[in-house]
Image: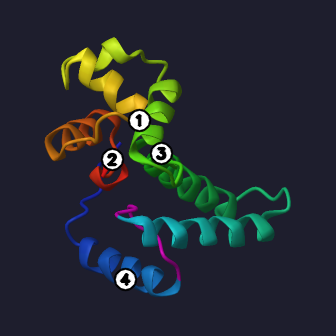
Amino acid sequence: MKARSHTGGVPEFAKTWSTLQDQIFLRSIRNDDDYRRMIALADELADQLEGEEGSLADLFSVVTDLIEVWESHHPDLPKTEPKDVLRYLLDAHDLKQKDLTDIASLTMISDILAGRRAISKSVAKALAERFGTDVSAFM
């Protein structure tokens, strides 16, 4: 089987991709606004599918894959106090306080969860990295 050269097709493909992006939002999700736009696109596609196979179903699959990747790295955290966000994440990841001793002492983690101590900036940053979330969740 003879391999096709793609070098001549790249400019044409780039033009086609640009045209497609002018019509729909289709790219990696980079922030919450992108996420909302991708959810809206998924909803619109789902309304059009109604059990059909083909190009729209394939596009819907790509869109939902992009959403799943974003959601796996950006959990929907409760809008509450930082100590409660930490408690939620510990439960969600099936972790114990002792599993965070690489970030802070067991006493400090216990004090944070009990509300006796605020989360410092350095601990907030380490927790955000550990759980793959924004540091503001812990501030």
Lower sequence index among marks 3 and 4: 4
Callouts 2 and 3 close, C-beta under 8 Å: no
Image mark for residue 138: 2
Q: Which residue is mark 3?
A: 75
Of the residues tagged 1 and 4, which is closer to the observer? 1
Say which amino acid is labelled 3. Answer: Pro
- What is the spatial separation of the Cα atoms under label 1 and label 3, in whole angstroms? 12 Å
State the separation of the CA atoms marked 1 and 4.
42 Å
Vertical comparison of 93 with 15: above or below: above
Q: How many marks?
A: 4
* Chain-order first, disc 1 or disc 2: 1
Dot placed on the residue nearer the N-terminal end, 1 or 3 = 3
Q: Is residue 20 magenta?
A: no
| Residue 47: percent from left, percent from top | 79, 69
Q: Secondary structure at mark 2?
A: helix
In the rendered structure, which segment of residues is drawn in magenta? 24-30
